């Protein structure tokens, strides 16, 4: 067990156990009051009704002494057994955290047992001990040892030591973030006949740590807890957060969509990994609705699902998808569905991490000697279904004819290939370090040559392709971040901001026509970007839309013109014709992100309403400021949309080159096909043809433009922009060429080996043994494998050569223009 | 030469065969800290199982591998040797025979780890040696395959002179701003380090291991002088932090992050320079920036931080990356079990 203490400047502390937040002293009171006091009040009421006011309690886990602190507030508690297996936590609780837990561990009523809770409870059951109150305060399980503390067997043992009138409270999970895990625990309690009722609340530190928008407990008893028992509860004093029984009753309200999921979460038995996989694969349901109450019924009418009892060979989600595949669905689609549901198998993984990890499933087959594996599987044909054996034979015949292309293999519609790929993928995922790997291979081959994931930019940098809007998940809108030297994007991620200088009077109207640099106003406006629309596009606080061009210049979109602005002086360098296609795309993107932000605002508002209704809201100010920041961002986006002026109703066609064969550098600026000139589409729709020496109205450079030559455009915009472009292209080319050189080197070595093997076979026969890599095999096999390697390498060489050949021709034009303008 | 493989259990890094193993790893240019017994101890605290195989020529330990496997493995797992195996790669015939023996020894023990294959990731520069021809290129690399190495045998003045002027300027600018870098091996600095790393992960879109990974790492390695934190502070606030490992002749900038705010204080530059000088003082001959794209390709996964690292000079290096060898019968067995699970 690893304990990390975060001691903050304000004297508060946060404690992490094995990487998970155990408690934060700023709000642990809320958690522990809600876990311990309702159960204590119910148990007290039940015992009092029988004229037996004193209670014996058991705390399982909770070595920090904080749940104990809550119980010991009550004079009716006569004895508390606290069992925790971690002596280190107990020692910290006794000394370092004594002020926080109210010296609970020094209370004479408390008896600490450093041992495994399972053993302790087992012994207590054998000794027929009974407790009036049991609190389970374990950390959320990360492994099978932790998961057993939520099994039917465990809860069965607790039921055995729970007094007839006794009450049990259990720390569980987030109902909205991991609803299936939450309800699986619920159903295990039900299966053990502990008649649980679910309740939940919001814990700011848990929400900030990413554990969910709510947090859930269960309260149960051997004898049903009647709804009326919750009406007039008297909670132990003093309390900071839990005010009344009414407030507690609100905690039993859930969104019905979440409540419905309890039908599909099985109770678990020892050995099952169902709960762990459900915990590792959150689904993030909306937490805010309260249209279902767990106090509305006496007995939960939901059917109890069948128990899950064994460790699975395949993860549940994968098995279910493969088993449920409709015969009409193609094998490729089934495989894609499996990849889509491929769960995280460890506590520190996330499903999105796994999805990224297997972005290219074919690469997992690349590494295999498929022929050898197919042969090994055929040797076990008797253990396999006929259909798969047939597929294996087909595969074997195919592999004989040609070398295997993993991509096409996956598309051949063979279930056996899917299963091999899934097993190999799982063997990778299960390794703790895999998903954090520092590099990944794009199309790596067994030939030892590598592709670098090279790319070539063929379209305008301002093309925007983004996923549909989703609610904010990052901290960028939080009051501690927003507008404080950072720029935030639609999901709440934040980045260093860029500062922009500009003169308001030069754009946004017709004033550009009378613009004169010498007559500029004294000081430029200076604005920080507030919102990042795309990696290049920022919105300033006043809604201006700016697109970074180079370190020294940016584009400013406005309703009549597009200005190129000097980032340092704020002065316009040149006014360009408005590009309707760019305006349309930007408008589309602004609209899309506005929809997402509005959804986020609504989601946040609903959540604040819910926590306000619950009545535990000491932290609400921060949330309201965050909400205000999100709303402010929507306003900024509105202003940005307004600043665009008229927007074409339909997507305009991509701008035609002003001169045949020219390429666009960025909106309004082109390079001629021969790289001799830049073409500037000025605001007055007149193209200007520009080189190092001047600018003209015609491509023949016979009609000079009377306005002064825009040297700043050349110096601050075109030269740096082209330099960057050329460097990027060079880098891409260099990278592909380096892969190509490596592949060719490999080919030479393979050809040499082939010649040697051929000679050996000729001289000594096909069964003579030779070295192939680190193996010793027959020369005929070595020849076969080397020929396959040569085939693969040859194909790689062609692919790489194709990539070099396909590098856009504008590269050469850009290079020439750069030479011209420098 | 008569070669053999033995399983080495519970070696201590400071005595006997354990000490010999550490000497061997430190002297092996294609290996590093992840093949040391200290790293193995750290990984054990993280719940991994470790298989240590030693390669002997007669009675002399000449190589081997520390192979790591997950604690539980369904339906299958891999035995992974990052920065390994330790082999005399410069002697291909011995390396070939040694690798073959290590692979057989791992196969003999594979069922204990539910392993269907073996992954190796020696720090060998490209091109891949022919003796790995029967190994497949792995789908993922654990280590940074492309990196930037700084030669620490140069004097500080020479190192500074070899940097790009802007980088040199920024190091001095950070100093003028009053950015101070302190070294720490205290576990209580982990939350601070982690907050900065997490912030960088969020900003630059990379995954960050859980916080206890780092506290375990520091706790297990710092007492042996193999890991330390460097924290750049300005006006009482931490602007950047870095986790540096030093082992043998090699220092590695393994993890680090800077704050999104106060970027103009150039804390990242101060931090790297402090790490470089600290590694030099620790007697290291090279400083590994751990992840670098030499081409300048803006779409490369390392593009963002490569621009920053480029300023420090150094020599780009590309390794062959991770390679896999699957045992057909073991993989077939896992596939058969998976098929049965679907019935």
Image (spheres, coloured by chain):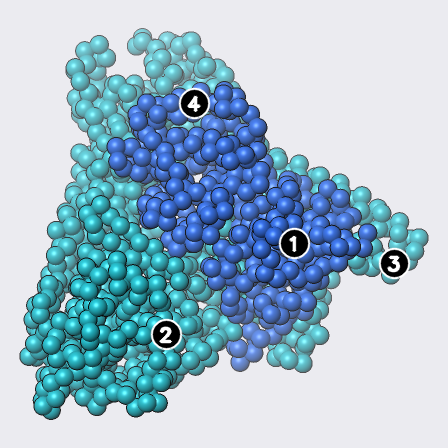
Chain colours: A cyan, B blue
Q: Are marks 1 and 2 on the same chain?
A: no
Mark 3 vs mark 2: in front: 2
Q: Are marks 4 and 1 on the same chain?
A: yes
Mark 4 vs mark 1: in front: 1
| Discs 4, 2 touching: Cβ within 8 Å | no
Q: Which residue is mark 2?
A: A115
Q: Secondary structure at mark 2?
A: loop
How much space separates mark 3 and mark 1, taking CA atoms?
39 Å
How much space separates mark 1 and mark 2, taking CA atoms?
37 Å
Q: Earlier in the sequence, mark 4 or mark 1?
A: 1
The chain carrying label 2 is: A
Residue, far right:
A763
| Discs 3, 4 touching: Cβ within 8 Å | no
Q: Which residue is mark 3?
A: A768
Q: Which residue is mark 1?
A: B17
Viewer-proximal residue among A437 and A402: A437
- The residue at the point 49 percent across, 21 percent down is B157
Is residue A183 positioned above or below A221 on the image? above
């Amino acid at each position: 067990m690893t304990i990390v203490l975060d001691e903050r400047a304000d004297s508060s502390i946060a404690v992490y156990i094995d990487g998970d937040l155990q408690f934060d002293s700023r709000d642990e009171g809320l958690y522990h009051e809600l876990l311990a006091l309702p159960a204590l009040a119910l148990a007290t009421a039940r015992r009092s009704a029988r004229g037996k006011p004193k209670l014996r309690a058991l705390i399982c886990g909770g070595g920090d002494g904080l749940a104990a602190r809550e119980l010991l507030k009550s004079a009716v508690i006569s004895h508390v057994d606290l069992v925790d297996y971690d002596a280190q936590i107990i020692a910290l609780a006794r000394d370092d955290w004594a002020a926080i837990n109210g010296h609970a561990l020094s209370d004479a009523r408390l008896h600490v047992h450093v041992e495994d809770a399972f053993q302790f409870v087992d012994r207590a059951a054998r000794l027929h001990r009974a407790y009036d109150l049991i609190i389970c305060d374990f950390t959320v399980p990360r492994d099978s040892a932790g998961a057993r503390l939520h099994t039917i067997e465990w809860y069965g043992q607790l039921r055995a030591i729970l007094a007839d009138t006794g009450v049990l409270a259990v720390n569980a999970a987030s109902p909205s973030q991991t609803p299936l895990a939450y309800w699986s625990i619920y159903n295990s309690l039900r299966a053990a006949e502990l008649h649980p009722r679910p309740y939940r609340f919001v814990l700011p530190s848990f929400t900030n740590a990413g554990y969910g928008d709510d947090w859930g407990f269960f309260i149960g008893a051997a004898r049903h807890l009647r709804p009326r028992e919750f009406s007039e509860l008297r909670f132990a004093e003093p309390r900071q957060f839990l005010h009344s029984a009414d407030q507690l009753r609100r905690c039993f309200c859930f969104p019905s969509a979440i409540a419905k999921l309890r039908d599909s979460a099985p109770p678990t038995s020892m050995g099952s990994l169902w709960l762990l996989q459900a915990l590792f694969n959150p689904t993030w349901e909306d937490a805010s609705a309260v249209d279902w109450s767990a106090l509305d019924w006496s007995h939960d009418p939901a059917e109890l699902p069948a128990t899950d009892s064994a460790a699975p060979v395949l993860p549940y989600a994968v098995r279910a998808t493969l088993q449920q595949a409709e015969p009409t669905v193609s094998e490729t689609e089934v495989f894609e569905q499996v990849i889509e549901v491929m769960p995280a198998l460890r506590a520190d993984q996330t499903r999105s991490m796994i999805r990224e990890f297997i972005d290219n499933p074919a690469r997992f087959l690349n590494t295999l000697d498929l022929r050898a594996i197919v042969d090994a599987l055929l040797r076990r044909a008797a253990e396999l279904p006929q259909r798969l054996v047939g597929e294996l034979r087909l595969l074997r015949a195919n592999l004989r004819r040609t070398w295997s292309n993993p991509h096409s293999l996956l598309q051949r519609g063979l279930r056996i290939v899917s299963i091999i790929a899934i097993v190999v993928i799982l063997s990778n995922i299960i390794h703790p370090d895999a998903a954090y790997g520092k590099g990944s291979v794009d199309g790596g081959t067994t030939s030892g040559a590598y592709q670098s994931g090279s790319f070539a930019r063929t379209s305008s940098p301002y093309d925007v392709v983004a996923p549909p809007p989703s609610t904010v998940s990052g901290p960028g809108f939080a009051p501690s971040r927003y507008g404080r030297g950072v720029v935030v994007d639609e999901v709440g991620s934040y980045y260093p901001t860029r500062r922009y200088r500009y003169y308001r009077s030069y754009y946004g109207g017709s004033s550009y026509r009378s613009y004169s640099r010498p007559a500029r106003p004294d000081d430029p406006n200076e604005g920080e970007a507030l919102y990042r629309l795309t990696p290049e596009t920022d919105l300033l606080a006043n809604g201006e839309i700016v697109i970074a061009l180079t370190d020294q210049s940016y584009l400013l979109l406005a309703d009549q013109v597009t200005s190129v602005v000097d980032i340092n002086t704020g002065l316009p360098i040149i006014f360009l014709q408005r590009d309707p296609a760019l305006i349309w795309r930007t408008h589309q993107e602004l609209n899309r992100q506005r929809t997402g932000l509005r959804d986020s605002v609504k989601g946040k508002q609903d959540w604040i309403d819910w926590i306000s209704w619950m009545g535990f809201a000491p932290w609400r100010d921060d949330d309201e400021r965050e909400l205000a920041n999100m709303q402010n961002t929507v306003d900024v986006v509105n202003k940005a949309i307004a600043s665009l002026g008229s927007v074409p109703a339909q997507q305009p066609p991509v701008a035609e080159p002003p001169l045949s064969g020219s390429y666009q550098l960025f909106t309004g600026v082109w390079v001629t096909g021969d790289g001799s000139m830049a073409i500037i589409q000025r605001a007055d729709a007149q193209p200007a043809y520009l080189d190092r020496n001047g600018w003209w109205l015609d491509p023949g450079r016979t009609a000079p433009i009377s306005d002064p030559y825009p040297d700043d455009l050349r110096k601050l915009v075109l030269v740096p922009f082209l330099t960057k472009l050329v460097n990027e292209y060079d880098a891409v080319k260099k990278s592909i060429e380096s892969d190509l050189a490596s592949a060719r080197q490999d080919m030479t070595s393979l050809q040499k080996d082939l010649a040697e093997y051929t000679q050996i076979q000729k001289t000594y026969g096909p069964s003579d043994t030779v070295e192939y890599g680190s193996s010793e095999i027959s020369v005929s096999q070595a020849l076969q494998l080397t020929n396959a390697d040569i085939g693969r390498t040859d194909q790689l060489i062609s692919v790489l050569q194709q990539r070099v050949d396909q590098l856009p021709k504008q590269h050469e034009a850009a290079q020439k223009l750069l030479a011209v303008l420098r | 030469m008569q070669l053999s493989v033995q399983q080495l259990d519970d070696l201590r890094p400071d005595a006997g065969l354990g000490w010999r193993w550490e000497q061997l790893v430190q002297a092996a240019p294609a290996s590093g800290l992840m093949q040391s017994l200290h790293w193995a101890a750290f990984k054990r605290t993280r719940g991994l199982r470790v298989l240590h195989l030693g390669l002997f020529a007669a009675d002399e330990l000449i190589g081997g591998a520390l192979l790591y496997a997950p604690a539980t493995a369904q339906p299958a797992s891999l035995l992974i040797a990052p920065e390994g195996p330790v082999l005399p790669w410069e002697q291909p015939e011995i390396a070939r025979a040694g690798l073959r023996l290590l692979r057989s020894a791992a196969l003999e023990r594979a069922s204990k780890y539910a392993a269907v294959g073996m992954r190796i990731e020696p720090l060998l520069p490209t091109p891949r040696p022919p003796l790995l021809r029967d190994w497949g290129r792995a789908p993922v690399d654990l280590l940074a395959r492309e990196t930037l190495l700084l030669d620490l045998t140069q004097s500080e003045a020479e190192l500074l002179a070899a940097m790009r002027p802007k980088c040199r300027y920024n190091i001095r600018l950070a100093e003028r701003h009053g950015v101070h870098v302190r070294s720490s091996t205290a576990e209580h600095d982990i939350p601070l380090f982690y907050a900065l790393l997490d912030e960088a992960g969020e900003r630059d879109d990379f995954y960050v291991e859980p916080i206890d990974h780092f506290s375990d790492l520091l706790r297990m390695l710092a007492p042996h002088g193999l890991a330390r934190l460097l924290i750049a502070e300005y006006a009482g606030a931490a602007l950047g932090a870095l986790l540096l490992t030093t082992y043998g002749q090699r220092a590695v900038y393994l993890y680090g992050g800077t704050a999104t705010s106060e970027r103009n204080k150039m804390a990242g530059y101060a931090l790297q320079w402090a790490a470089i000088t600290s590694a030099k003082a620790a007697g290291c001959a090279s400083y590994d920036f751990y992840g670098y794209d030499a081409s300048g390709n803006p779409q490369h996964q390392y593009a963002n931080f490569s621009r920053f690292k480029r300023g420090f000079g150094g020599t780009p290096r590309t390794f062959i990356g991770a390679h896999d060898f699957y045992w057909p019968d073991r993989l077939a067995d896992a596939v058969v079990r998976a098929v049965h699970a679907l019935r």
